[in-house]
Image (cartoon, rainbow, N blue to C red):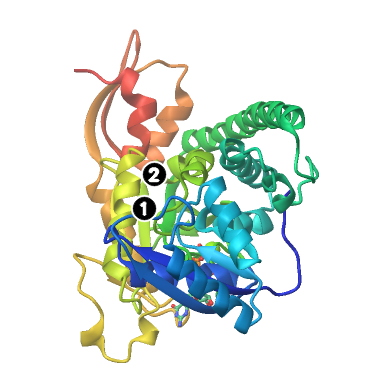
Protein backbone atom coordinates (compact mmCIF):
# COMPACT_ATOMS: atom_id res chain seq x y z
CA UNK A 1 0.00 0.00 0.00
CA UNK A 2 1.24 3.47 -0.81
CA UNK A 3 1.31 5.52 2.32
CA UNK A 4 2.94 8.73 3.36
CA UNK A 5 4.11 8.61 6.92
CA UNK A 6 6.47 11.49 7.58
CA UNK A 7 6.84 13.93 10.41
CA UNK A 8 4.04 16.45 10.52
CA UNK A 9 4.03 18.58 7.41
CA UNK A 10 3.14 22.26 7.43
CA UNK A 11 0.95 23.07 4.49
CA UNK A 12 -0.27 26.09 2.59
CA UNK A 13 -3.62 25.60 0.88
CA UNK A 14 -4.01 27.16 -2.57
CA UNK A 15 -7.32 27.92 -4.22
CA UNK A 16 -8.18 29.42 -7.59
CA UNK A 17 -11.64 30.97 -7.70
CA UNK A 18 -13.03 30.62 -11.21
CA UNK A 19 -16.59 31.06 -9.98
CA UNK A 20 -17.43 27.42 -10.70
CA UNK A 21 -17.99 26.32 -7.11
CA UNK A 22 -18.27 27.71 -3.59
CA UNK A 23 -14.64 28.46 -2.77
CA UNK A 24 -15.13 29.13 0.93
CA UNK A 25 -16.92 25.83 1.54
CA UNK A 26 -14.38 23.95 -0.53
CA UNK A 27 -11.46 25.53 1.34
CA UNK A 28 -13.03 24.70 4.68
CA UNK A 29 -13.27 21.11 3.54
CA UNK A 30 -9.67 21.12 2.22
CA UNK A 31 -8.60 22.38 5.64
CA UNK A 32 -10.30 19.40 7.31
CA UNK A 33 -8.91 16.99 4.73
CA UNK A 34 -5.39 18.30 5.36
CA UNK A 35 -5.82 17.90 9.09
CA UNK A 36 -7.23 14.40 8.63
CA UNK A 37 -4.19 13.46 6.52
CA UNK A 38 -2.03 14.38 9.50
CA UNK A 39 -0.60 17.65 8.15
CA UNK A 40 -0.92 21.10 9.69
CA UNK A 41 -2.95 23.50 7.51
CA UNK A 42 -0.92 26.63 8.19
CA UNK A 43 -2.74 29.06 5.94
CA UNK A 44 -4.60 29.52 2.68
CA UNK A 45 -4.26 31.74 -0.38
CA UNK A 46 -6.97 32.34 -2.93
CA UNK A 47 -6.72 33.90 -6.35
CA UNK A 48 -9.63 34.96 -8.54
CA UNK A 49 -9.06 34.29 -12.22
CA UNK A 50 -11.30 33.35 -15.13
CA UNK A 51 -9.39 30.10 -15.66
CA UNK A 52 -6.36 28.32 -14.16
CA UNK A 53 -2.87 29.06 -15.54
CA UNK A 54 -1.60 26.16 -17.64
CA UNK A 55 1.95 26.36 -16.26
CA UNK A 56 1.46 26.77 -12.51
CA UNK A 57 -2.33 26.81 -12.01
CA UNK A 58 -2.12 30.19 -10.22
CA UNK A 59 -0.61 33.20 -12.03
CA UNK A 60 3.13 33.86 -11.94
CA UNK A 61 2.81 36.83 -9.56
CA UNK A 62 0.77 34.72 -7.17
CA UNK A 63 3.28 31.87 -7.45
CA UNK A 64 6.00 34.30 -6.34
CA UNK A 65 3.89 35.34 -3.33
CA UNK A 66 3.31 31.71 -2.47
CA UNK A 67 7.04 30.91 -2.64
CA UNK A 68 7.87 33.84 -0.36
CA UNK A 69 5.20 32.82 2.12
CA UNK A 70 6.45 29.25 2.12
CA UNK A 71 10.03 30.32 2.84
CA UNK A 72 9.12 32.87 5.47
CA UNK A 73 6.98 30.42 7.43
CA UNK A 74 9.15 27.36 6.82
CA UNK A 75 6.35 25.36 5.23
CA UNK A 76 7.07 22.15 3.37
CA UNK A 77 3.90 21.35 1.46
CA UNK A 78 1.59 23.06 -1.02
CA UNK A 79 -1.90 21.65 -1.46
CA UNK A 80 -3.88 22.84 -4.46
CA UNK A 81 -7.66 22.47 -4.24
CA UNK A 82 -8.02 20.94 -7.72
CA UNK A 83 -6.49 18.31 -10.00
CA UNK A 84 -3.07 19.39 -11.29
CA UNK A 85 -1.31 18.30 -14.48
CA UNK A 86 2.21 16.81 -14.22
CA UNK A 87 3.61 20.03 -15.71
CA UNK A 88 1.85 22.18 -13.14
CA UNK A 89 3.15 20.00 -10.31
CA UNK A 90 6.70 20.12 -11.63
CA UNK A 91 6.68 23.89 -12.18
CA UNK A 92 5.10 24.66 -8.84
CA UNK A 93 7.61 22.39 -7.08
CA UNK A 94 10.55 24.01 -8.85
CA UNK A 95 9.41 27.52 -8.07
CA UNK A 96 8.37 26.96 -4.47
CA UNK A 97 11.07 24.47 -3.54
CA UNK A 98 8.57 22.28 -1.67
CA UNK A 99 6.43 19.25 -2.44
CA UNK A 100 3.18 19.94 -4.26
CA UNK A 101 0.07 17.78 -4.18
CA UNK A 102 -3.50 18.30 -5.33
CA UNK A 103 -6.89 17.62 -3.76
CA UNK A 104 -7.20 14.20 -5.35
CA UNK A 105 -3.78 13.04 -4.14
CA UNK A 106 -4.67 14.27 -0.67
CA UNK A 107 -7.93 12.33 -0.57
CA UNK A 108 -6.29 9.22 -2.03
CA UNK A 109 -3.62 9.48 0.64
CA UNK A 110 -6.20 9.60 3.44
CA UNK A 111 -8.01 6.64 1.94
CA UNK A 112 -4.73 4.73 1.69
CA UNK A 113 -3.99 5.23 5.35
CA UNK A 114 -7.52 4.19 6.40
CA UNK A 115 -8.08 1.18 4.17
CA UNK A 116 -8.27 -1.87 6.34
CA UNK A 117 -10.11 -4.65 4.59
CA UNK A 118 -8.91 -6.49 1.50
CA UNK A 119 -11.58 -4.83 -0.63
CA UNK A 120 -10.79 -1.39 0.75
CA UNK A 121 -7.09 -1.77 0.01
CA UNK A 122 -7.73 -3.02 -3.50
CA UNK A 123 -10.16 -0.18 -4.18
CA UNK A 124 -7.74 2.49 -3.00
CA UNK A 125 -4.69 1.13 -4.80
CA UNK A 126 -6.69 0.85 -7.99
CA UNK A 127 -7.80 4.48 -7.71
CA UNK A 128 -4.22 5.59 -6.99
CA UNK A 129 -2.75 3.80 -9.98
CA UNK A 130 -5.48 4.97 -12.33
CA UNK A 131 -4.80 8.51 -11.21
CA UNK A 132 -1.06 8.03 -11.60
CA UNK A 133 -0.95 6.37 -15.01
CA UNK A 134 -1.80 9.34 -17.26
CA UNK A 135 0.44 11.50 -15.08
CA UNK A 136 3.60 9.53 -15.76
CA UNK A 137 5.32 12.27 -17.73
CA UNK A 138 8.92 12.26 -18.92
CA UNK A 139 10.16 13.84 -15.72
CA UNK A 140 9.00 11.04 -13.51
CA UNK A 141 8.94 12.31 -9.97
CA UNK A 142 5.44 10.87 -9.61
CA UNK A 143 6.43 7.32 -8.84
CA UNK A 144 8.74 8.29 -6.04
CA UNK A 145 6.17 10.62 -4.55
CA UNK A 146 3.97 7.68 -3.67
CA UNK A 147 6.93 5.82 -2.22
CA UNK A 148 5.44 2.69 -3.68
CA UNK A 149 8.68 1.01 -4.67
CA UNK A 150 7.57 0.69 -8.27
CA UNK A 151 10.38 2.99 -9.35
CA UNK A 152 12.08 5.68 -7.36
CA UNK A 153 14.25 7.77 -9.64
CA UNK A 154 13.43 9.85 -12.68
CA UNK A 155 13.04 7.21 -15.33
CA UNK A 156 14.35 7.45 -18.89
CA UNK A 157 11.89 6.77 -21.69
CA UNK A 158 12.42 3.00 -21.71
CA UNK A 159 12.25 2.80 -17.93
CA UNK A 160 9.03 4.81 -18.18
CA UNK A 161 7.55 2.33 -20.63
CA UNK A 162 8.40 -0.51 -18.26
CA UNK A 163 6.75 1.37 -15.41
CA UNK A 164 3.66 2.00 -17.50
CA UNK A 165 3.41 -1.62 -18.48
CA UNK A 166 3.98 -2.67 -14.89
CA UNK A 167 1.22 -0.35 -13.67
CA UNK A 168 -1.22 -1.48 -16.35
CA UNK A 169 -0.60 -5.09 -15.39
CA UNK A 170 -1.12 -4.25 -11.74
CA UNK A 171 -4.35 -2.40 -12.60
CA UNK A 172 -5.61 -5.48 -14.47
CA UNK A 173 -4.71 -7.74 -11.60
CA UNK A 174 -6.33 -5.44 -9.01
CA UNK A 175 -9.47 -5.18 -11.12
CA UNK A 176 -9.70 -8.98 -11.27
CA UNK A 177 -9.14 -9.42 -7.54
CA UNK A 178 -11.66 -6.72 -6.74
CA UNK A 179 -14.18 -8.38 -9.00
CA UNK A 180 -13.81 -11.62 -6.99
CA UNK A 181 -14.19 -9.82 -3.68
CA UNK A 182 -17.27 -8.02 -4.94
CA UNK A 183 -18.79 -11.22 -6.22
CA UNK A 184 -18.37 -12.75 -2.80
CA UNK A 185 -19.88 -9.69 -1.15
CA UNK A 186 -22.89 -9.60 -3.42
CA UNK A 187 -23.48 -13.29 -2.74
CA UNK A 188 -23.58 -12.58 0.98
CA UNK A 189 -25.89 -9.69 0.27
CA UNK A 190 -28.20 -11.80 -1.84
CA UNK A 191 -28.28 -14.47 0.83
CA UNK A 192 -29.24 -11.82 3.39
CA UNK A 193 -32.03 -10.69 1.13
CA UNK A 194 -33.21 -14.24 0.50
CA UNK A 195 -33.17 -14.89 4.21
CA UNK A 196 -35.69 -12.15 4.45
CA UNK A 197 -33.63 -9.47 6.12
CA UNK A 198 -34.75 -5.95 5.58
CA UNK A 199 -31.73 -3.81 4.78
CA UNK A 200 -31.05 -0.22 5.79
CA UNK A 201 -28.04 1.95 5.00
CA UNK A 202 -26.42 5.03 6.48
CA UNK A 203 -25.10 7.46 3.88
CA UNK A 204 -23.94 11.05 3.93
CA UNK A 205 -20.93 13.29 4.18
CA UNK A 206 -17.87 12.22 6.02
CA UNK A 207 -17.91 13.28 9.69
CA UNK A 208 -21.73 13.63 9.73
CA UNK A 209 -21.86 11.07 12.52
CA UNK A 210 -22.93 7.94 10.63
CA UNK A 211 -20.75 5.57 12.64
CA UNK A 212 -21.75 7.22 15.92
CA UNK A 213 -25.39 6.77 14.93
CA UNK A 214 -24.72 3.17 13.99
CA UNK A 215 -23.19 2.58 17.42
CA UNK A 216 -26.03 4.35 19.20
CA UNK A 217 -28.62 2.27 17.36
CA UNK A 218 -26.94 -1.13 17.43
CA UNK A 219 -24.04 -0.99 19.88
CA UNK A 220 -21.80 -1.98 16.98
CA UNK A 221 -18.55 -0.52 18.29
CA UNK A 222 -17.57 1.00 14.93
CA UNK A 223 -14.70 3.50 15.09
CA UNK A 224 -16.02 7.06 15.08
CA UNK A 225 -13.74 10.06 15.22
CA UNK A 226 -13.56 13.71 14.38
CA UNK A 227 -11.67 13.15 11.17
CA UNK A 228 -12.65 12.74 7.55
CA UNK A 229 -13.06 9.30 6.03
CA UNK A 230 -12.81 7.50 9.34
CA UNK A 231 -14.88 4.68 7.86
CA UNK A 232 -14.02 3.06 4.53
CA UNK A 233 -15.25 -0.47 4.89
CA UNK A 234 -18.91 -1.25 5.26
CA UNK A 235 -20.06 -2.77 8.57
CA UNK A 236 -23.45 -4.42 9.02
CA UNK A 237 -25.33 -5.00 12.28
CA UNK A 238 -28.81 -6.11 13.21
CA UNK A 239 -31.29 -3.55 14.48
CA UNK A 240 -34.76 -4.24 15.91
CA UNK A 241 -37.56 -1.89 14.98
CA UNK A 242 -40.29 -1.16 17.56
CA UNK A 243 -42.82 -3.32 15.67
CA UNK A 244 -40.50 -6.31 16.00
CA UNK A 245 -39.00 -6.48 12.50
CA UNK A 246 -35.23 -6.91 12.29
CA UNK A 247 -33.26 -4.68 9.95
CA UNK A 248 -29.67 -5.18 8.80
CA UNK A 249 -28.13 -1.71 9.09
CA UNK A 250 -24.96 -0.91 7.12
CA UNK A 251 -22.53 1.91 7.84
CA UNK A 252 -20.37 2.90 4.91
CA UNK A 253 -17.84 5.28 3.36
CA UNK A 254 -18.61 9.02 3.61
CA UNK A 255 -18.68 11.59 0.84
CA UNK A 256 -17.06 14.97 0.18
CA UNK A 257 -17.81 17.51 -2.49
CA UNK A 258 -15.99 16.90 -5.78
CA UNK A 259 -15.04 13.39 -4.75
CA UNK A 260 -12.30 12.25 -7.18
CA UNK A 261 -13.74 10.41 -10.13
CA UNK A 262 -11.44 7.39 -9.74
CA UNK A 263 -12.48 6.97 -6.13
CA UNK A 264 -16.17 7.02 -6.99
CA UNK A 265 -15.40 4.39 -9.63
CA UNK A 266 -13.42 2.28 -7.19
CA UNK A 267 -16.07 2.50 -4.48
CA UNK A 268 -18.97 2.22 -6.87
CA UNK A 269 -19.94 -1.30 -5.85
CA UNK A 270 -19.91 -0.32 -2.17
CA UNK A 271 -22.09 2.69 -2.92
CA UNK A 272 -24.39 0.75 -5.23
CA UNK A 273 -25.08 -1.78 -2.54
CA UNK A 274 -26.00 1.09 -0.27
CA UNK A 275 -28.44 2.43 -2.83
CA UNK A 276 -30.16 -0.96 -2.97
CA UNK A 277 -31.12 -0.93 0.72
CA UNK A 278 -34.84 -1.11 1.55
CA UNK A 279 -34.55 2.15 3.45
CA UNK A 280 -31.76 4.72 3.32
CA UNK A 281 -30.81 7.16 6.06
CA UNK A 282 -29.28 10.29 4.53
CA UNK A 283 -27.36 11.66 7.51
CA UNK A 284 -25.99 15.18 7.79
CA UNK A 285 -24.46 17.40 10.44
CA UNK A 286 -27.26 19.79 11.39
CA UNK A 287 -24.79 22.20 12.97
CA UNK A 288 -23.09 22.77 9.61
CA UNK A 289 -24.15 25.65 7.36
CA UNK A 290 -23.80 23.19 4.55
CA UNK A 291 -26.34 20.68 5.84
CA UNK A 292 -28.97 21.26 3.10
CA UNK A 293 -26.30 21.15 0.37
CA UNK A 294 -24.84 17.94 1.78
CA UNK A 295 -28.23 16.25 1.89
CA UNK A 296 -28.85 17.25 -1.71
CA UNK A 297 -25.46 16.04 -3.01
CA UNK A 298 -26.02 12.70 -1.31
CA UNK A 299 -29.54 12.42 -2.68
CA UNK A 300 -28.27 13.07 -6.21
CA UNK A 301 -25.53 10.49 -5.89
CA UNK A 302 -28.05 7.91 -4.67
CA UNK A 303 -30.31 8.71 -7.62
CA UNK A 304 -27.34 8.21 -9.97
CA UNK A 305 -26.75 4.84 -8.38
CA UNK A 306 -30.31 3.79 -9.11
CA UNK A 307 -32.19 3.97 -5.82
CA UNK A 308 -35.55 5.07 -7.32
CA UNK A 309 -38.46 3.86 -5.26
CA UNK A 310 -36.31 3.20 -2.20
CA UNK A 311 -37.36 5.44 0.68
CA UNK A 312 -34.73 7.97 1.78
CA UNK A 313 -35.05 9.53 5.22
CA UNK A 314 -33.11 12.77 5.73
CA UNK A 315 -31.57 12.74 9.21
CA UNK A 316 -30.30 15.91 10.90
CA UNK A 317 -27.72 14.68 13.37
CA UNK A 318 -25.79 16.55 16.08
CA UNK A 319 -28.87 18.51 17.11
CA UNK A 320 -27.37 18.71 20.61
CA UNK A 321 -24.91 21.26 19.20
CA UNK A 322 -27.73 23.64 18.37
CA UNK A 323 -29.06 25.24 21.55
CA UNK A 324 -32.03 26.89 19.88
CA UNK A 325 -34.44 24.52 18.18
CA UNK A 326 -35.55 27.36 15.88
CA UNK A 327 -32.04 27.41 14.42
CA UNK A 328 -32.18 23.83 13.21
CA UNK A 329 -32.67 23.96 9.46
CA UNK A 330 -36.11 22.83 8.31
CA UNK A 331 -35.49 20.36 5.57
CA UNK A 332 -38.53 18.48 4.29
CA UNK A 333 -39.50 15.71 6.66
CA UNK A 334 -36.04 15.38 8.14
CA UNK A 335 -35.79 13.61 11.49
CA UNK A 336 -33.78 15.52 14.10
CA UNK A 337 -31.54 13.39 16.26
CA UNK A 338 -28.42 13.41 18.33
CA UNK A 339 -26.41 10.23 18.10
CA UNK A 340 -24.46 11.51 21.07
CA UNK A 341 -27.32 12.10 23.53
CA UNK A 342 -29.73 9.60 22.00
CA UNK A 343 -32.35 12.27 21.43
CA UNK A 344 -34.78 11.51 18.60
CA UNK A 345 -33.55 7.97 18.04
CA UNK A 346 -36.86 6.34 18.92
CA UNK A 347 -38.63 8.64 16.54
CA UNK A 348 -36.09 7.73 13.86
CA UNK A 349 -36.89 4.05 14.34
CA UNK A 350 -40.62 4.73 13.99
CA UNK A 351 -40.06 6.77 10.85
CA UNK A 352 -37.97 3.93 9.41
CA UNK A 353 -40.78 1.52 10.16
CA UNK A 354 -43.39 3.79 8.58
CA UNK A 355 -41.43 4.34 5.41
CA UNK A 356 -40.76 0.65 5.06
CA UNK A 357 -44.51 0.16 5.29
CA UNK A 358 -45.50 2.90 2.83
CA UNK A 359 -42.86 1.94 0.27
CA UNK A 360 -44.45 -1.49 -0.11
CA UNK A 361 -45.65 -2.21 -3.59
CA UNK A 362 -48.62 -4.47 -4.32
CA UNK A 363 -47.81 -7.27 -6.76
CA UNK A 364 -49.23 -10.52 -8.08
CA UNK A 365 -46.73 -13.33 -8.39
CA UNK A 366 -46.50 -16.85 -9.66
CA UNK A 367 -43.68 -18.31 -7.62
CA UNK A 368 -42.27 -21.75 -8.52
CA UNK A 369 -42.24 -24.25 -5.63
CA UNK A 370 -38.44 -24.24 -5.77
CA UNK A 371 -38.34 -20.61 -4.63
CA UNK A 372 -39.27 -21.19 -1.03
CA UNK A 373 -36.49 -18.84 0.10
CA UNK A 374 -38.10 -15.98 -1.75
CA UNK A 375 -41.48 -16.89 -0.38
CA UNK A 376 -40.06 -16.68 3.14
CA UNK A 377 -38.51 -13.33 2.28
CA UNK A 378 -41.87 -11.97 1.13
CA UNK A 379 -43.49 -13.03 4.39
CA UNK A 380 -40.81 -11.45 6.52
CA UNK A 381 -40.21 -8.24 4.62
CA UNK A 382 -43.68 -7.64 3.27
CA UNK A 383 -47.17 -8.98 3.71
CA UNK A 384 -49.00 -11.74 1.89
CA UNK A 385 -52.64 -10.91 1.20
CA UNK A 386 -53.73 -14.06 -0.56
CA UNK A 387 -52.15 -17.27 -1.75
CA UNK A 388 -53.24 -20.19 -3.81
CA UNK A 389 -51.58 -23.42 -4.91
CA UNK A 390 -51.58 -23.98 -8.64
CA UNK A 391 -49.94 -26.58 -10.83
CA UNK A 392 -47.10 -24.20 -11.63
CA UNK A 393 -46.42 -22.83 -8.19
CA UNK A 394 -47.77 -20.44 -5.57
CA UNK A 395 -50.05 -17.71 -6.82
CA UNK A 396 -49.52 -14.80 -4.44
CA UNK A 397 -50.88 -11.34 -3.95
CA UNK A 398 -48.42 -9.53 -1.73
CA UNK A 399 -46.99 -6.18 -0.75
CA UNK A 400 -43.23 -6.15 -1.14
CA UNK A 401 -40.50 -3.61 -0.34
CA UNK A 402 -38.46 -2.08 -3.21
CA UNK A 403 -35.41 -4.12 -2.20
CA UNK A 404 -37.21 -7.32 -3.19
CA UNK A 405 -38.68 -6.21 -6.49
CA UNK A 406 -35.45 -6.97 -8.39
CA UNK A 407 -35.34 -10.57 -7.21
CA UNK A 408 -39.07 -11.04 -7.84
CA UNK A 409 -39.45 -9.24 -11.16
CA UNK A 410 -39.30 -12.43 -13.24
CA UNK A 411 -42.17 -13.96 -11.28
CA UNK A 412 -44.50 -10.97 -11.46
CA UNK A 413 -47.71 -11.27 -13.41
CA UNK A 414 -48.72 -8.42 -15.77
N1 LIG B 1 -22.03 16.76 19.36
C1 LIG B 1 -22.21 15.69 18.62
N2 LIG B 1 -21.18 15.10 18.02
C2 LIG B 1 -21.39 14.01 17.27
C3 LIG B 1 -22.69 13.46 17.09
N3 LIG B 1 -22.60 12.38 16.28
C4 LIG B 1 -21.28 12.27 15.97
N4 LIG B 1 -20.56 13.23 16.55
C5 LIG B 1 -19.10 13.44 16.43
O1 LIG B 1 -18.77 13.71 15.07
C6 LIG B 1 -17.52 13.14 14.72
C7 LIG B 1 -17.68 12.25 13.50
O2 LIG B 1 -18.46 11.14 13.82
P1 LIG B 1 -18.41 9.77 12.98
O3 LIG B 1 -19.50 8.91 13.54
O4 LIG B 1 -17.03 9.23 12.93
O5 LIG B 1 -18.81 10.32 11.54
P2 LIG B 1 -18.96 9.49 10.19
O6 LIG B 1 -20.12 10.07 9.46
O7 LIG B 1 -19.00 8.03 10.46
O8 LIG B 1 -17.61 9.88 9.44
P3 LIG B 1 -16.79 9.05 8.32
O9 LIG B 1 -16.62 7.66 8.76
O10 LIG B 1 -15.52 9.81 8.24
O11 LIG B 1 -17.58 9.15 7.02
C8 LIG B 1 -17.05 12.39 15.96
O12 LIG B 1 -16.13 13.21 16.65
C9 LIG B 1 -18.33 12.19 16.78
O13 LIG B 1 -18.07 12.11 18.16
C10 LIG B 1 -23.79 14.11 17.77
O14 LIG B 1 -24.96 13.74 17.69
N5 LIG B 1 -23.48 15.22 18.50
MG1 LIG C 1 -17.78 6.53 9.91
Any part of residue 213 in sight: no
The answer to whether the beta carbon of the residue marked 1 is less than 8 Å from any atom of ligand 1 is no
Q: Can you give x and y, in whole percent of width and height, for residue 252 in the image? A: 51, 54
* Residue plotted at (44% across, 52% down): 259
Q: Is mark 2 within 8 Å of ligand 1?
A: no
Residues tagged 1 and 2 counted as in contact (Cβ below 8 A): yes
Residue density around tag 1, few if under 14, some if 14–19, many if 20 or more, within 10 Å:
many
- Looking at the image, residue 72 sits to the left or right of residue 373; the answer is right
For the question of whether residue 340 can be seen, the reply is yes
Q: Which residue is mark 2?
A: 275
- As drawn, 191 above or below 250: above
Decide: is 300 above or below 210. Answer: above
* x then y, percent, for residue 203: 42, 56
The residue wearing badge 1 is: 280
Q: Label 1's element?
A: strand
Locate residue 208 relative to residue 290 in the image: left or right: right
- Residue at mark 1 to residue at mark 2: CA–CA distance: 7 Å
Q: Position of residue 74 (x, y in %)?
A: 66, 80
Residue 131 lies in quadrant = top right
Q: Residue furthest top?
A: 391
Q: Residue at left 40%, top 41%? A: 380
Q: Quadrant of ligand 2?
A: bottom right
Q: SS for tag 2?
A: helix
Front position in the image: 108 or 159:
159
Asked if 324 appears above or below 82 in the picture, the reply is: below
Instruction: Tell me which residue sits at (57%, 31%) in the image.
Output: 187
- Nearest the viewer among 323 and 309 is 323
Q: Which image quarter is the C terminus in?
A: top left
The mark nearer the N terminus, 1 or 2, is 2
Residue extending farthest to the bottom is 323
Q: Badge 2, how many Cα within 10 Å: few under 14, some, many 20+?
A: many
At 38% from the left edge and 37% from the top edge, which residue is drawn?
379
Amino acid sequence: MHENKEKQERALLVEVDTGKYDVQASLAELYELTRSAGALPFGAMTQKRPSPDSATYVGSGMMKQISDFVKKNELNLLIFDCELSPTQIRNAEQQSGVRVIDRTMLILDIFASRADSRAGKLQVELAQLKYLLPRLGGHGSELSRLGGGIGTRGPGESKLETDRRHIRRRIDSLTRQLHDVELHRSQINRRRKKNGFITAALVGYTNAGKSTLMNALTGAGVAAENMLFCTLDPTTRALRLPGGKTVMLTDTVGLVRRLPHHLVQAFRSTLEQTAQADVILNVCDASSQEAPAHLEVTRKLLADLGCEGHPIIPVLNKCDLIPDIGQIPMIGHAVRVSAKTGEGLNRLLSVMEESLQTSLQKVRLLLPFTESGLEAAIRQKGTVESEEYTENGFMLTASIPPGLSGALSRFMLE
